[in-house]
Image: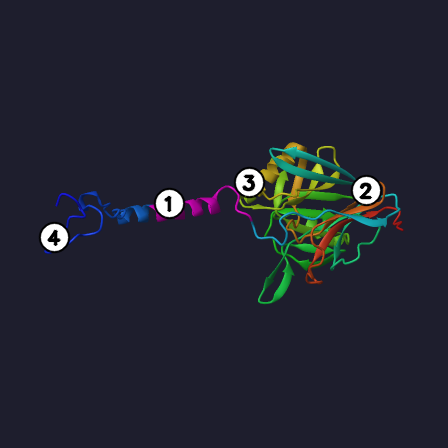
Amino acid sequence: MDKLDNIGENEIRIIGANPDTQQKPPKRKPWYLVVIAAVALVIGIMAYIIRGCNSEPSDTETPVKIESDTIIECSGYVEMADTMINNVSLHCYIPVNAKPKLVLGLIKDIPGKYILGAMAADFSVDNGIYSVTGAFVIHGEMLNHSKSKYGFCALLKDTVIIGNDLTTAYFEKAIEERGDFFRQHALVHESEVVNKVISKVCALRRSLCRLNDGRLCIIDTDMSVSLDDFSEALRQYGAVEAIALMGTGAAVRWATDEAGRRYIAGADEYDFPNDVVNYIVWESTDNGEK
């Protein structure tokens, strides 16, 4: 045919593309490429999970700082300082004109005389029964004698000792002198990081420290950090001795500044078991409050 329009009676015209110019269907990728992609995805997810900081579950990732409407009037107050060491933000709370002690039982309404406080010893549950973790003495009464943790704090008549010793005699002394005693993880001992509890797991951290100038303080962070990074930051800050305190988002810490304003961190609406939840608090020496 010279032209498409010139079609004889015994001829037909096929409508469509030239077979030589038709696109061939794309070849399917080999199955092994799909497998490689799947393996790479799994490896990426695992690397993300097990990398340096694996966040521990907590009720709140960062504690809420609240300024109280109540102005507290007493001689005791808290010096507050913020700093950054090795990309770890530290908040330091140093009590002035106040004496520390342990308090057992859930505190819903914080007395004005308690110018600084935080949850102290951990507690756990076994078969539905809650108990304080580690040796615990309050006002001379022994509630637990477990030696599960090396760090300890003994609050005696005129002395507060923070240390790292599994068999310390201060436990018996606290009973004899009707003092207080609790155990926690040791973080810093004699100005060196304690290696027994080194961990890469990240969480909110809080500690009870003795600084190189002799003063006691609470130091915490509002960011999730590993225990070894936190301990090293404490050492560089000047902690001679340091033990952990409860530091999850649900663990409460409060501090009252010199103007009488109280700042609270943590979630205080949780109903912890009243017979095991405990705090270390600093009570103003004049016990005054408004």
Of marks 2 and 1, which one's residue comes earlier in the chain? 1
Tell me the mark number nearer the camera, choosing from 1 and 4: 4
Using the rendered view, name the quadrant where residue 132 is placed: bottom right
Q: How far apart are labels 1 and 4 at the CA level?
A: 63 Å
User: Residue 188: x, y in percent?
Assistant: 63, 39
Q: Which mark is residue 257?
A: 2
Residue identified by numbered label 1 = 40
Q: Amino acid at mark 4?
A: Gly
Judged from the image, the secondary structure of the residue bearing numbered disc 3 is helix
Choose the circle earlier in sequence order: 3 or 4: 4
Mark 2: amino acid: Asp
Instruction: Give the label on residue 195, or none.
Output: 3
Q: Which residue is mark 4?
A: 8
Q: Secondary structure at mark 1?
A: helix
Q: Amino acid at mark 3?
A: Asn
- Residue situated in front as seen by the camera: 97 or 31: 31
| Residue 144 visible in rendering | yes
Q: Earlier in the sequence, mark 1 or mark 4?
A: 4
* Magenta range: 37-55
